[in-house]
């Protein structure tokens, strides 16, 4: 089993255990055709790990904060944000809602599926984008082991001033 397969299995195990402990059903995985349909609407391909999360783990409803968005929610949110005044970058798909209008987003054009944080609360589009994690795999590992800034057990949440690096590619991607 390769590293990606191991990561997918770890995520699936955590999701199953969490859903069982909370006594709530998990959304069924997306069908491969749903991924292709979403990609057609979006105009770009989902990174393989993100597509595998949707097709092998579940159609959202798991993960940090308010959870991974369903595929349909991600597509609709992307469209709405692209039409908003925030000059949303092409190929940057919101995948998790952190509340207060903040989203974790995957840069679907990056080789590693870099995860970006969109935080419009400073009020300036140039300040709204920062690099959360260099890869989707790293973002998932941080959630699994509790070391990501958004995990309560990490101690890095709202109690501290989080200093994420600004996303330098923002201007070239709008």
Image (tube, rainbow, N blue to C red):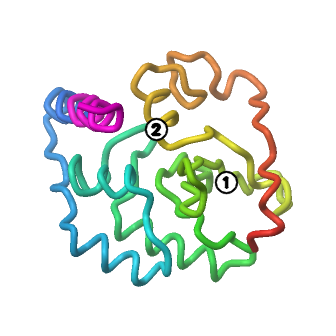
Residue 109 locus on image (x, y percent): 59, 63
**Which callout, 2 or 1, points at the residue further toward the start of the chain?**
1
User: In the picture, which quadrant includes the C terminus?
Assistant: bottom right
Residue highlighted by disc 2: 137
User: Hey, which quadrant is residue 1 in on the image?
Assistant: top left
Nearer to us in this view, 135 or 66: 135
Residue 95 locus on image (x, y percent): 47, 55
Identify whether 102 is placed above or below 34. Answer: above
Q: Which residues are magenta?
A: 1-14
Nearer to us in this view, 22 or 169: 169
Q: Is residue 111 left or right of residue 57?
A: right
Identify whether 15 is placed above or below 92. Answer: above
Residue 140 locus on image (x, y percent): 44, 35
User: Hey, which quadrant is residue 74 in on the image?
Assistant: bottom left
Nearer to us in this view, 44 or 163: 44
- Secondary structure of residue under mark 2: helix
């Amino acid at each position: 089993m390769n590293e990606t397969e191991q990561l997918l299995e770890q995520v699936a195990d955590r999701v199953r255990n969490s859903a069982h402990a909370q006594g709530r059903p998990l959304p069924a995985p997306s069908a491969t055709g749903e991924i292709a349909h979403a990609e057609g609407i979006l105009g770009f391909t989902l990174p393989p790990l993100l597509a595998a999360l949707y097709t092998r783990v579940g159609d959202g409803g798991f993960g940090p904060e308010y959870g991974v968005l369903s595929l349909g929610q991600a597509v609709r949110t992307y469209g709405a944000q692209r039409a908003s005044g925030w000059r949303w970058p092409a190929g940057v798909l919101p995948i998790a809602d952190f509340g207060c209008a903040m989203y974790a987003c995957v840069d679907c054009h990056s080789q590693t599926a870099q995860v970006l944080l969109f935080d419009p609360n400073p009020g300036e589009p140039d300040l709204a984008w920062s690099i959360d994690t260099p890869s989707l795999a790293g973002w998932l590992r941080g959630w699994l082991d509790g070391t990501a800034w958004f995990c309560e057990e990490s101690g890095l949440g709202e109690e501290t001033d989080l200093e994420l690096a600004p996303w330098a590619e923002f201007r070239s991607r709008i």
